Image (spheres, rainbow, N blue to C red):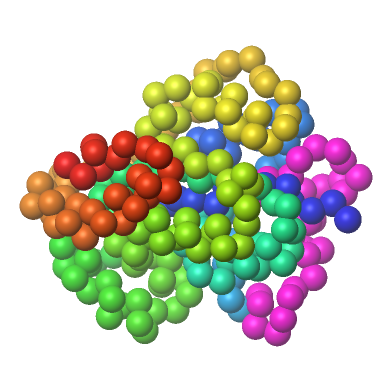
C-alpha cells in the first residue's frame, strides 16, 4: 500500500505554506489540495482505535503512482499523540521541520487568530490566560490558543526523536527559507531523494499585517520563558541561536 512518504510537521507560522508550494511544483511529489489534512492530530478520529487510512489516501489520487506523497500539517509536531500515531502508520516517514524564532512565532500566531476574529484578548492577556484556557480547551481551541506552548521546540524535538531516528528529520530555520528558497528547496529535495529542480520564482510569503509591532517588553518576557529551551535546542542542532535570545 502506498503511504505518505513525508510530513512538513512544524511549525505553524514558520513558512510551511511556502515550502509546501515549492514541493507541490516538483513532478515527483504530490501534495494534497487541502494543505493541512490534520489526519494524525484529530483525537476524534482516533477515539476508537487506529482509523483506516482510505480517506486520507484518497487525497493523493492514483495509489499506483511512484511520486512521493507529502502532508504539510504543522500541528503534528506539537500535538503530543501525533508523532506516535505517525510512527504506527509509517515508521519510515520523513519529517521536515521549519523553526522560527519562537517569540516572533507566538506574536504572529496571536495576530492570525485576532484577524480571524477568534481572539478577543490582547497579546499579553492571551499569554497570561493560556494555561487556564488550555486546561479546558477543545481540540480546536487548543490549536488556536497555544501561542506560548508551541514555541518550546527542544522538548518537542526530544519527543519526536523518541519515535523516529534523527536521520529521518530535516530541521531548518524559517529565515533560511525566506532568504534562500532555492538553496533550501535543493536541501529538501536531496533529503527526500528526488531530483533537483531548476530554481524558480519563490512563492509569495504568507505574512500577515500587524497593527503594531511586538512590544519590546513582551518580547523580553517571551525570551525569558524560552531561553533554556533555546539553549537546549542549540545543543541538539548545533545551531547558534543568539538572535532568538535578543
Q: Does 140 sit left or right of 82 as displayed?
A: left
Q: Does 192 sit left or right of 170 as displayed?
A: right
What residue is rendered at 73% in x and 23% in y? 195
Q: Residue furthest top?
A: 198
- In this rendering, is residue 45 above or below 99? below
- Looking at the rendering, which quadrant does residue 204 occupy? top left
- Looking at the rendering, which quadrant does residue 14 occupy? top left
Q: In this orientation, which residue lies closer to the viewer: 77 or 234? A: 234
Horizontal and vertical percent position of residue 127: 22, 66
What residue is rendered at 54% in x and 59% in y? 160
Q: In this orientation, which residue lies closer to the viewer: 234 or 78? A: 234
Q: Does 49 sit left or right of 81 as displayed?
A: right
Query: From which residue to which does the magenta span run?
Result: 45-72
Q: Does 205 sit left or right of 114 as displayed?
A: right
Q: Is residue 59 magenta?
A: yes
What residue is rendered at 25% in x and 42% in y? 244
Can you say which quadrant of the picture contains the C terminus?
Answer: top left
Q: Is residue 140 magenta?
A: no
Q: In this orientation, which residue lies closer to the viewer: 131 or 44? A: 131
Horizontal and vertical percent position of residue 26: 69, 28
Amino acid at each position: 500500500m502506498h503511504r505518505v512518504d513525508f510530513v512538513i510537521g512544524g511549525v505553524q507560522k514558520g513558512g510551511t505554506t511556502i515550502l509546501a508550494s515549492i514541493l507541490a511544483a516538483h513532478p515527483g511529489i504530490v501534495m494534497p489540495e487541502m494543505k493541512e489534512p490534520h489526519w494524525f492530530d484529530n483525537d476524534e478520529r482516533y477515539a476508537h482505535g487506529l482509523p483506516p487510512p482510505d480517506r486520507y489516501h484518497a487525497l493523493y489520487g492514483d495509489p499506483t503512482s511512484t511520486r512521493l506523497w507529502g502532508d504539510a500539517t504543522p500541528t503534528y509536531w506539537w500535538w503530543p499523540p501525533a508523532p506516535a500515531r505517525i510512527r504506527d502508520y509509517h515508521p519510515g516517514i520523513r519529517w521536515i521541520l521549519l523553526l522560527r524564532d519562537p517569540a516572533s512565532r507566538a506574536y504572529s500566531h496571536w495576530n492570525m487568530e485576532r484577524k480571524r476574529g477568534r481572539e478577543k484578548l490582547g497579546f499579553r492577556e492571551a499569554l497570561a490566560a493560556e494555561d487556564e484556557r488550555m486546561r479546558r480547551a477543545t481540540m480546536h481551541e487548543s490549536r488556536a490558543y497555544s501561542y506560548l506552548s508551541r514555541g518550546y521546540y527542544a522538548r518537542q524535538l526530544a519527543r519526536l526523536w523518541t519515535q523516529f531516528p534523527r536521520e529521518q528529520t530535516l530541521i531548518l530555520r524559517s529565515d533560511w527559507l525566506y532568504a534562500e528558497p532555492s538553496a533550501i528547496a535543493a536541501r529538501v529535495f536531496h533529503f527526500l531523494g528526488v531530483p533537483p529542480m531548476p530554481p524558480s520564482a519563490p512563492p509569495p510569503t504568507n505574512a500577515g499585517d500587524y497593527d503594531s509591532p511586538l512590544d519590546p517588553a513582551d518580547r523580553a518576557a517571551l525570551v525569558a520563558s524560552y531561553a533554556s529551551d533555546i539553549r537546549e535546542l542549540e545543543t541538539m542542532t548545533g545551531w547558534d541561536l543568539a538572535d532568538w535570545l535578543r
